[in-house]
Amino acid sequence: MNQRARIAMSDDDVAAFLESSRKLQLATINPDGTPHLVTMFYGLDAGRIAFWTYTKAQKARNLARDPRVSCLIEAGDDYDQLRGVLVYGKAEPIADRDGVMAVGMMVARRMTPGVPDELLSPYVEQTGRKRVAYVVERTKVVSWDHRRLTSTTTD
């Protein structure tokens, strides 16, 4: 087995990693073709990455023009502990306000673990008035778990 195949995560491992993480690096494409990269909290909608942002934010303007995104979620500080998932896809806008608010609650829960929904709802309702939400439809997923490099077991 080659090293790339050895460090790739299974679909279940990818799902668990996305579930356990809180933030991602979101890349959209600026009008001049350069990447626009920002850190975002995210939620999961049936396993798909979901996020929201202010309607006038650069990423929202970029996505209105070109919905392609890259989402990087990573963990680990030392080389032998690096883990990550890179999701390529298209950010599909969520059209209805209830959907936007649902994504807002997903994101708020990740931003503030353990805070009850009744305390999060006023924040989500207030900021949600000026926000749009998206769900990422995956086109490709790349993953790695360098902890497998030092594993003595074989697959």
Image: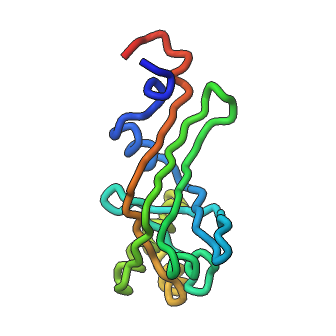
> What percent of the width, then of the height, locates residue 47?
34, 55
**Can you say whether 134 is above or below 5 in the image?**
below
The residue nearer to you, when weighing 57 against 112, is: 57
Report whether 60 appears left or right of 79: left
The residue shown at (50%, 22%) is: 3
Any part of residue 65 in sight: yes
Q: Can residue 119 be seen at all in this image of the molecule?
A: no
Taking depth in this image into account, of 95 and 103 the one nearest to the observer is 95
**Residue visible at 43% across and 11% down in the picture:** 153
From what the image shows, is residue 85 above or below residue 56? above
Left or right of 127, for residue 153: left
Residue furthest top as drawn: 152
Q: Quadrant of residue 77?
A: top right
> Is 134 left or right of 53, judged from the image as shown?
left
- Please say which color scheme the image uses: rainbow
Image mark count: 0
Seen from the viewer's position, the closer of residues 38 and 70 is 70
Left or right of residue 149, residue 18 in this image: left
Residue visible at 47% across and 46% down in the picture:
20
Q: Position of residue 14 (x, y in %)?
A: 41, 42
Quadrant location, the N terminus = top left
Query: Residue 88: image x %, image y %?
Result: 47, 56
Work out which residue is located at the far left of the displayed protein and give it. Answer: 46
Pick the quarter of the image with the C terminus.
top left
Q: Give the image quarter of residue 44.
A: bottom left
Q: Residue at x 35, y 63 (%)?
A: 45
Kindly give the residue lying farthest to the bottom in the view shown: 129
Q: Residue furthest front?
A: 32
